[in-house]
């Protein structure tokens, strides 16, 4: 197999019209007049060649560039957007995720704003913990004044982001984290109630085990001044939790992060603790760490009604080498990030098209069997990636911070291997359900020029409906109008179950899927939305958070249908 077979004909079969549009708008390099001067094939060659070469051409360069090209070109695996956009160009910044420290000093805060701006310029997203900042009325010794607190500084980060468009192709995205025991936590929880504010941020509360214990016992917990360690006051855990629930019910924010669960899995505690994640929550990183992501398209691994594990294993191996190479050819925005990233060499191998895989196997997403299959596949991917990372360590050395006396795992090349990213744009290129999410709709009506309407039907549903003879334009119209396949008597019950969408799947099943994936093979974390119906109550939201915590999730985002006017990163709206 080789480059000869990649003709225009194959290309036409592979890429959808939507994919081609997305690529032309944002991914293909442009000429001086702003016209795309690339095709999918030449883009894949640019990426494969640059990443195969890394720092200097290895002896197996030809083999590597062929394997990389093949896997990307055929949509078996796609790296995160910055890699597709910037590999082999002068910009050369290839990572999506960064966490920057925000120290409790003027110098530290404005250094973080500057560093964040440099990251955004190259297409990366940044996560910040504001938990180290002294609270709003704490004293400032040098000026004898009082501090303005984390929220007032977060507003400056927000304003800086507003003025910088990420690399001209992505808008700046930030995660802002505050610990539940920070004295300003109550202000933070309600900060985004005003939907005009902090629009370049996702806000999440870092919830501790101590807080969850106080909540279970209906007890109090302490707020601690970060600059002095002094207990400022105690609050009823239940009342604070209810505040979070109220706001999340109202408009989906703040999200929650389970910070102690994340730190239990910290692969290099000797280097520091996790304080924050990247904007969409799938990567816990240490201050100044960055991570490059890539996703296996599971839609492409079903053969005759079964998972093709041999080809999946090969693809995971190639993807692991690819992501590890990305670290070496990356141009890091600042030296501190380069230094930290090279110490741990974290990669984020994830999945997309999980729902496609389950549909092709005829298994409902929200079922025990669906969760079992998902967990088995994710564990398989993790184990294959780990084996490859161990092999890479033998070939090129373990990640430098590896310490056999401190770390209870074998020497490998990468401190973290797996996470599940949203794949908001790359899943549009691959034409599959994003990340580990179920499809959002099965039939959509698109209004085009002259009042014409285009009926867009999920490709698997159309195939099934035509094969089983229940396809009709009238039915498709009805499915589009009702927003669901459920309850239409023309559709056999079995298919109603298999084609349930995000809104038809009950919230507990969403959470159980996230929990199953987290426990089976995801090192870092998972970006996932728990969809609640518009009729969901505050009790339902509360129940979701507690269930997610108990199932070992490292964070949770709930979204009640229709509750928010606009979202920072509404995955399908971004293109
Ligand atoms: N991200 C960002 N800006 C965006 C979208 C994403 O900075 O507009 C970052 C963010 O850290 C997010 C990560 O990229 O968590 C991965 O997002 P996604 O998988 O949706 O990116 P894709 O590669 O599909 O563009």
Image: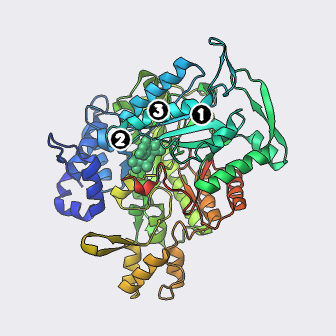
573 to the left or right of 515: left
The dot on residue 151 is 1
> Ligand 1: does it lie within 8 Å of the C-beta at label 2?
yes
Q: Quadrant of ligand 1?
A: top left
What is the secondary structure assignment of the residue under circle 1?
helix
Query: Alpha-carbon distance for marks 3 and 2?
Result: 17 Å
If the image is split into quadrants, where does the N terminus sit? bottom left
The dot on residue 307 is none
Please provide percent x and percent y for residue 235.
80, 39
What is the secondary structure assignment of the residue under circle 3?
loop
Q: Is 144 in front, or is 464?
A: 144
Residue under the point 52% across and 48% down: 382
Find disc 2 in the rendering and name its residue. Answer: 82
From this view, report whether residue 471 is shown above or below residue 399.
below
87 to the left or right of 354: left
> Ligand 1: does it lie within 8 Å of the C-beta at label 1?
no
Looking at marks 2 and 1 on the same chain, the residue that comes earlier in the sequence is marked by 2
């Amino acid at each position: 197999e080789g480059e000869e077979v990649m003709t225009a004909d194959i290309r036409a079969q592979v890429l959808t019209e939507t994919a081609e549009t997305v690529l032309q708008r944002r991914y293909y390099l442009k000429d001086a007049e702003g016209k795309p001067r690339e095709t999918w094939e030449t883009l894949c060659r640019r990426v494969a060649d640059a990443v195969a070469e890394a720092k200097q051409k290895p002896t197996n360069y030809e083999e590597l560039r062929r394997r990389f090209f093949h896997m990307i070109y055929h949509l078996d695996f796609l790296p995160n957007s910055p890699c597709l956009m910037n590999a082999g160009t002068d910009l050369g910044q290839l990572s999506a995720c960064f966490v920057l420290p925000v120290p409790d000093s003027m110098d530290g805060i404005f250094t973080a704003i500057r560093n964040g701006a440099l990251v955004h310029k190259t297409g990366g997203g940044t996560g910040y913990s504001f938990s180290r900042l002294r609270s709003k009325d704490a004293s400032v010794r040098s000026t004898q004044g009082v501090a303005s607190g984390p929220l007032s500084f977060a507003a400056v980060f927000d304003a800086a982001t507003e003025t910088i468009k990420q690399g001209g192709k992505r808008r700046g995205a930030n995660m802002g984290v505050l610990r539940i025991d920070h004295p300003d936590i109550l202000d933070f929880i309600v900060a985004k109630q005003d939907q005009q504010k902090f629009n370049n941020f996702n806000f999440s509360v870092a919830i501790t085990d101590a807080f969850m214990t106080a909540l279970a016992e209906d007890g109090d917990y302490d707020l601690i001044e970060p600059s002095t360690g002094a207990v400022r006051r105690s609050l009823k855990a239940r009342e604070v939790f209810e505040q979070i629930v109220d706001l999340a019910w109202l408009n989906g924010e703040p999200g929650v992060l389970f910070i102690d669960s994340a730190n239990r899995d910290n692969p290099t505690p000797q280097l520091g603790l996790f304080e924050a994640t990247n904007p969409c929550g799938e990567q816990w990183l240490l201050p100044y760490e960055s991570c490059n992501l890539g996703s296996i398209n599971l839609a492409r691994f079903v053969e005759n009604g079964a998972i093709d594990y041999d080809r999946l294993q090969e693809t995971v191996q190639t993807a692991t080498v690819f992501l590890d190479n990305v670290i070496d050819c990356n141009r890091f925005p600042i030296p501190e990030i380069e230094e930290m990233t090279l110490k741990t060499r974290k990669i984020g191998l994830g999945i997309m098209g999980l729902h496609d895989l389950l549909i092709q196997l005829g298994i409902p997403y929200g079922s025990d069997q669906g969760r079992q299959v998902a967990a088995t596949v994710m564990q398989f991917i993790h184990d294959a990636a780990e084996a490859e990372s161990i092999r890479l360590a033998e070939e090129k050395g373990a990640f430098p911070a590896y310490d056999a006396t401190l770390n209870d795992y074998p020497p490998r090349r990468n401190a973290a291997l797996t996470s599940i990213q949203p794949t908001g744009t790359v899943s549009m290129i691959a034409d599959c359900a994003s990340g580990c999410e179920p499809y959002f709709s099965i039939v959509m009506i698109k209004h085009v020029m002259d009042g014409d309407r285009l009926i867009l039907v999920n490709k698997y549903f159309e195939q099934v409906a035509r094969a089983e003879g229940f396809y009709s334009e009238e039915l498709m119209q009805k499915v589009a109008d009702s927003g669901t396949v459920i309850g239409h008597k023309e559709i056999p019950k079995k298919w109603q179950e298999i084609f349930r969408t995000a809104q038809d799947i009950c919230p507990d099943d969403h959470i159980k899927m996230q929990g199953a994936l987290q426990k089976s093979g995801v090192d870092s974390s998972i970006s996932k939305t728990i969809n609640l119906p518009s009729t969901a109550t505050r009790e339902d939201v509360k129940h979701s958070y507690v269930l997610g915590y108990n199932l070992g999730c490292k964070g949770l985002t709930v979204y009640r249908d229709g509750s928010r006017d606009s979202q920072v990163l509404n995955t399908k709206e971004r293109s």
